[in-house]
Amino acid sequence: MAQQPMWALPQPEVLRSAGDPCLSPRRLLTIHAHPDDETTKGGGSVARYAAAGVGTVLVCCTGGEAGSILNPALDQPDIKTRLPEVRRTELQTATTHLGYQRVWMLGYRDSNMPASGEPGTFAAAPLEETVQALVRLMRRERPHVVVTYSDDQRGYQHPDHLRVHEASIPAYAVAGDPSYHPELGAPWQPQKLYYVVWSRASLIARHEAFVRLGLESPFKPERWQRRPSMDYRLTTRVFIG
């Protein structure tokens, strides 16, 4: 990647800190677009590794301010007006249960779908700016494994999910390069990069678990069967019990 000037980088905020992940001999960093993505996309794997003593860090790129309310019970006027606060509280609660040691809010606003193009939204930010912001956090947290999104967001082309991929791949590639913006921290090269995808088996298992508990399932087959299967991308499965 060609060297670019430093941008006025967003100022990440620590939403949750429970110990120092860098003290763990093995460290995992996940990059997600919105609050709730950390749970629905690989949350079980994070919980398993956190319980095994792996240092776990989440980078949440936006506050999910433009998100849709999918639960009819929560589709109330007061919830809509407080949606950023509600999603922030949900993120704090979810990451506590999953065992994340540190949660970074990268500082961008939800881009909406389709993208609004408004200044300050994730998809509207210069790509190189976001790459540098992620490199800074990778060098600080020093993960051995990075989990992000694939380039093939089949059936769900949310601009923020696409931008997570577009920014995290080059950030992973240059984080260990001492010539790339040394002011962002000492170089650190993660060892592995994974994409998180929903398998059909996972979606079915989630739906059946909700049904067994007598809860309204957000994973009803009619909601996701219209989307192309991502099973062809699977290379690794993590048993979470």
Image (cartoon, rainbow, N blue to C red):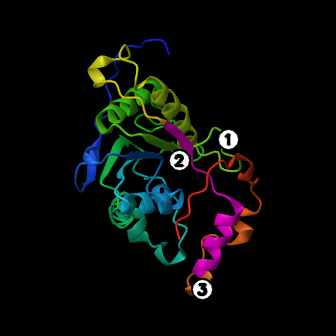
Q: Secondary structure at mark 1?
A: loop
Name the residue: 38% across, 40% down: 143
Residue 218 lies, with reference to residue 15, above or below; the image says below
Inter-mark Cα distance, 1 to 2: 19 Å
State the count of labels.
Answer: 3
Q: Residues within 10 Å of mark 3 (few under 14, many from 20)?
A: few
What residue span does the magenta drawing correspond to? Answer: 192-210
Q: Earlier in the sequence, mark 3 or mark 1?
A: 1
Give the foreground label among 2 and 3.
3
Give the camera-side residue of 193 and 213.
Answer: 193
Marks 1,2: beta carbons within 8 A: no
Residue under circle 2? 112
Q: Position of residue 127 (x, y in %)?
A: 48, 27
Inter-mark Cα distance, 3 to 1: 32 Å
Residue under circle 1? 152
**Callout 1, which amino acid?**
Asp
**Callout 2, which amino acid?**
Asn
Numbered circle sitting on residue 212: 3
Q: Residues within 10 Å of mark 2 (few under 14, many from 20)?
A: many
Q: Earlier in the sequence, mark 1 or mark 2?
A: 2
**Callout 3, which amino acid?**
Arg
12 relative to 70 in the view: left or right: left
Residue 4 lies, with reference to residue 146, above or below; the image says above
Q: Secondary structure at mark 2?
A: loop
Residue 4 lies, with reference to residue 87, above or below; the image says above
Numbered circle sitting on residue 2: none
Residue 34 falls within the magenta-colored stretch? no
